[in-house]
Amino acid sequence: MKTARRFAGLVWKLTKIACSEQPNKDAEYRRTIFYSFKEWGGIYIKFLQVMAGASKFMEGWGGPREMEVFSQAPREELNLANYIDLNNFTQVSAEPVAAGSFALVYRGILRTGEDVAIKVLRPSIKNGLKHNLRILGYLCNFFTRFLPKTLVDYNEAYGACAKMFTLETDYRREMANQEFFAKLYHNHPRVVIPKIYRELSSSDVIVQDFIDGPTLADVMSKATPEKPASQLAQELTGSDLWEQIVVAGGEALYTAMCADYVYGDPHPGNIILLPSNRIALIDFGIIANRPRSHRAFFDWVQSYHDILDGQGGFKRLLETSVTCFCPDIALAMQRCNFGDADLLTVLSEAVTDKLDHEMNGNVSYLESFKAGHLADVFIKVVDTKVIEVEIDMVNFELMKAMQAFLGSVTILDNAEGRHGFAEIMYRSMDYAINNATLRGIPNDNVHNTRLGVTESYELLVRTISTLADNDEYMFNFVRERIFA
């Protein structure tokens, strides 16, 4: 009955917006969904955290204050004595010191003197996850069918979240993830990972070192025009917030270049700000597997870095993007050689030429790219239907992790009026590239494609046919290049 009332109430609110004469209904739909889900708590807040990580969801209405969804969720009653042996502690907080979407966090002191966080899986999540996922799926299907298809694909977001949410309730898996990163960052000068006390933990509880400090979500949500987040962070920690963001972004890129796993949930509520420009990472329920090729990922980041540095262009970026995220397609295209160039090179040249042509007289696509409008540039490419890219699960996890971080940076940068997105990206890439080069990048390029010779040439014919049917400008460019 409660679920039905919630569902009906939200539909009624959305219907009123649809029948109104508001000029920007799409933004109001998203705002209404946000605040309804925030009130419902649990997986609905977790869904919002994923959506809010994509700045497009909050475009036109949201800002840093909405970032509180990353730091404090509604609380619920539980008896802590049912989850831990209180005899192991000299002190335990009577109430949670933090309330996440999936967990409640208490603070305690062990008999051996350590200050610890006691993370307990919410009973409502443990007992009601499947039911609430089913309801969330119905809602997302409703949103997709009846709301404008402008900025958000709710069904796609749900598909990404369903598996992710189930994994986040597996605390034994999460502890193994956290121990991997604790070893990776052992004695690191800038990154702290809390130690786990395995003997005190269980399938529903993780006991770990308590890390004292504000989260990035805290300073974003509490910032005001008079006291921006960077000033608030400086007062609370003595650190440079933008330097800490560079460390978070740089380490995410570096691990994708050199490590077996990448921290998969770098949203603002999971990044704790510490003195001396350090950060702590918490919550390891989500991690991303390494890319198929560390070297290809490094080359992709380097090509992006070169554009921001004024040393490269979009042609190289497109080539490295396909090689990194779709190596089978890249190798198949490279097999289709036309004297001095292969199909991937020709298509990259065609896309670059088309973008130059379309944006002639406006801001160049490179300037748009430098300003952080990556999606605006790629949409022009995707709309040509030239390369039918299939993103596998590994790449999807990597891109979701990056998106969560970039969405936060975009919102924070806009709120502070810095217009420094490109600068932060450049510094993060510089950090990662320098560290990877210093420590050594695995030489693991993919050399074998699962596509045979016949399939490679079928790809060529399909590509040319697609261009002929959908993009006359690029078809003529490719035809002249191939048949010159």
Image (cartoon, grey):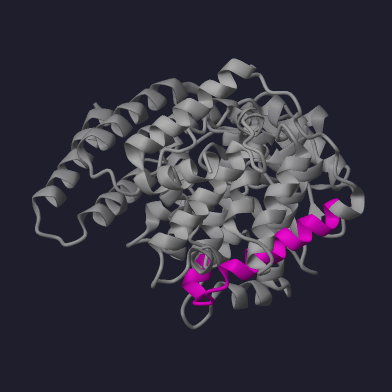
Relative height, residue 387 to residue 252 (above, below): above
- Is residue 266 visible in the rendered structure shown here? yes
Residue range in magenta is: 412-436
Where residue 20 appears, x then y in whole percent? 9, 55
- Residue at x-position 86% and y-position 53%: 437
Magenta stretch contains residue 230: no
Relative height, residue 165 to residue 90 (above, below): above
Q: In this view, does 301 lie to the left or right of 445?
A: left
**Which of the two residues, 484 or 359, is positioned nearer the viewer here?**
484
- Residue at x-position 62% and y-position 59%: 215
Where residue 305 appears, x then y in whole percent? 68, 60
Q: Quadrant of residue 136?
A: top left
**Which of the two residues, 242 or 463, is positioned nearer the viewer here?**
463
Magenta stretch contains residue 435: yes
- Residue at x-position 74% and y-position 24%: 448
Which quarter shows the N terminus? top left
